[in-house]
Image: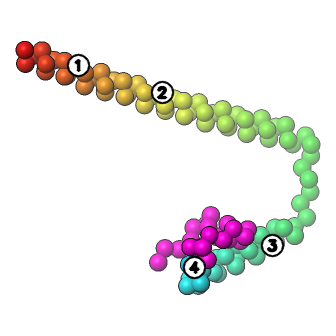
Amino acid sequence: MNHLTAEQLVDLAEGAQPPSSVTHLRACDRCRRELAEIRSTMSILAAADVPEPSPLAWEPLAARVSDAIDRERAREATIAGQLRAWTASIAASFIRRRFRANRRAT
């Protein structure tokens, strides 16, 4: 039996109930127990008294998030650039081979 994923269980705990998940819960003790644990944890966390962070915390956090996004974009750009270079190299190699094969045939 395929059990519900953590994401599906959290969705259920938050009230989003896809029909397939609800059907599975009716038949699966394990997933019902995990859902109950998630709901219990969410209840405990909701009741916790968490102080508001200092206003001075937001600027460094925003800078760290921005830096992380920039690094990820740069990494993706590097990967995309490498893929384009490899694709161009393969295409050039293929064209060169076809050209040579056609020259030999004539």
Marks 3,4: beta carbons within 8 A: no
Callout 1: helix, strand or loop?
A: helix
Colour scheme of the rendered structure: rainbow
Three-letter amino acid code of the residue under disc 1: Arg
Three-letter amino acid code of the residue under disc 2: Gly
Please state the horizontal and vertical placement of residue 31, each as a whole percent of the image: 60, 78
Q: Residues within 10 Å of mark 2 (few under 14, many from 20)?
A: few
Residue at 89% x, 49% y is: 53
Mark 1, residue position: 96
Q: Separation of disc 4 and disc 1 at Cα? A: 58 Å
| Closer to us: 88 or 22 | 22
From what the image shows, is residue 63 above or below residue 43? above
Choose top left, top right, bottom left or bottom right for residue 88.
top left
> Which numbered disc flags the more N-terminal residue, 2 or 3?
3
Mark 2, residue position: 81
Please state the horizontal and vertical placement of residue 38, each as a whole percent of the image: 70, 72
Choose top left, top right, bottom left or bottom right for residue 19.
bottom right
